[in-house]
Image (spheres, rainbow, N blue to C red):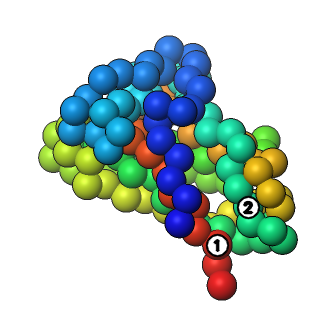
Amino acid sequence: MPTYAAADANVGGGAVLADDSAAEGGKDVGNLHLADSFVEFSEINGGENGGRNIITIHYATPEKAKLRLSVNGTDYSFVNTLPTGAWNDYTGQSCLTVPLKPGKANVVRLTGGHGGVHVDYITVSPLL
C-alpha cells in the first residue's frame, strides 16, 4: 500500500506545510480551513492497469470538517473528517474509492474551506 507524505505534496490557497513531531513524517499540511486552500499529491501510482483504488486520508482535527477530493481534475465528493480529539492526534482515517489511470500519472487534490483539518499523509490501495 503506497504512502504519500504531506512533506512531498504541493500546497496552495493559503495551506501550509508545517513541522509537527506527532505527524508520521514530522510534517503536516494545515490551514485547510481557508477557502480554496489545497494539498495536492502527484505521481500517484494507479498500478499496471489502473482501476478502482481506495484513497485513505490520514489526519488530525479537534472538530468535524470536510475535504473535497478531486482525482485527475475530476471532483469526486466531500470526504468527512471526524474529530480525533486534537490538532496533533493523527488517528483519523477517511477514505473514498475512485478510479486511477495506470502508472504514476495520477494527481490527488484535497481542497479545504469546510472546517479545519491537518493532513498527515494519504495511502492508495487497489481494489482486488
The quadrant in which residue 60 appears is: top left
Q: Is residue 83 in view?
A: no
Viewer-nearest residue: 2 or 123:
2
Residue at (22%, 50%) from the top-left corner? 84
Viewer-nearest residue: 13 or 26:
26
The quadrant in which residue 45 appears is: bottom right
Q: Is residue 39 in view?
A: yes
Is residue 56 shown left or right of residue 89?
right
The quadrant of the rendering that contains the C terminus is bottom right
Query: Is disc 1 placed on a helix, strand or loop?
Result: strand
* Type of amino acid under label 2: Gly
Q: Earlier in the sequence, mark 1 or mark 2?
A: 2
Query: Farthest bottom residue?
Result: 128
Callout 1–callout 2 Cβ contact below 8 Å: yes
Query: Farthest left residue?
Result: 85
The quadrant in which residue 50 appears is: bottom right
Counting every numbered tag in the picture gives 2
Query: Is disc 2 placed on a helix, strand or loop?
Result: loop
Dot 2, crowdedness within 10 Å: few (<14), some or many (≥20)?
A: many
How much space separates mark 1 and mark 2, taking CA atoms? 8 Å
Task: Please name the residue that numbered disc 2 is placed on.
Answer: 46
Residue at (57%, 17%) from the top-left corner? 13
| Residue 55 placement (x, y as % from top left) | 56, 60
Is residue 117 shown left or right of residue 13?
left
| Residue 39 placement (x, y as % from top left) | 55, 32
Task: Please name the residue that numbered disc 1 is placed on.
Answer: 126
Dot 1, crowdedness within 10 Å: few (<14), some or many (≥20)?
A: some
- Residue 63's place in the image compared with 27, above or below, is below
* Type of amino acid under label 1: Pro
